[in-house]
Amino acid sequence: EGRFDHGDPVICVDNNGAILAKGLVNYNSIEINKIKGLKTKQIGQVLGHKDYDEIIHRDNMAVTGQHYKK
């Protein structure tokens, strides 16, 4: 939710609002609304560019311990 730009920190929550992770996004909020739920190969087709394969790369994400399962 909300507006943010590429590189901004965001909080990822579940449907109940519990925090799952925090990370730096590779796309802005408008782009994410267009590509969420798509396969990686579709990103470039929808946006006209594909700078990254993921919205948040795991190297730029901190997962909270409460909801993380291996």
Image (spheres, rainbow, N blue to C red):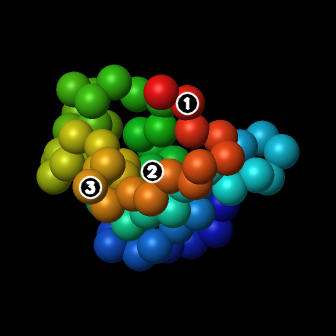
Q: Nearer the viewer, residue 64 or 57?
A: 64
Residue visible at 41% across and 40% down? 35
Q: Whole-percent x and y of residue 25?
A: 38, 62
Do labels 1 and 2 touch, CB within 8 Å? Answer: no
How far, Cα to Cα, is label 3 from label 1? 18 Å
Q: Amino acid at mark 1?
A: Lys
Residue visible at 78% across and 41% down? 15
Q: Amino acid at mark 2?
A: Ile
60 horizontally vs 38: left or right:
left
Mark 1 or mark 2: which is in front?
1
Q: Nearer the viewer, residue 27 or 25?
A: 25
Residue picked out by circle 3: 59
Find residue 69 and name its label. 1
Residue picked out by circle 2: 32
Residue visible at 47% across and 38% down? 36
Q: Whole-percent x and y of residue 69?
A: 55, 30
Of the numbered discs 3 and 2, the one sitting upstream in the chain is: 2
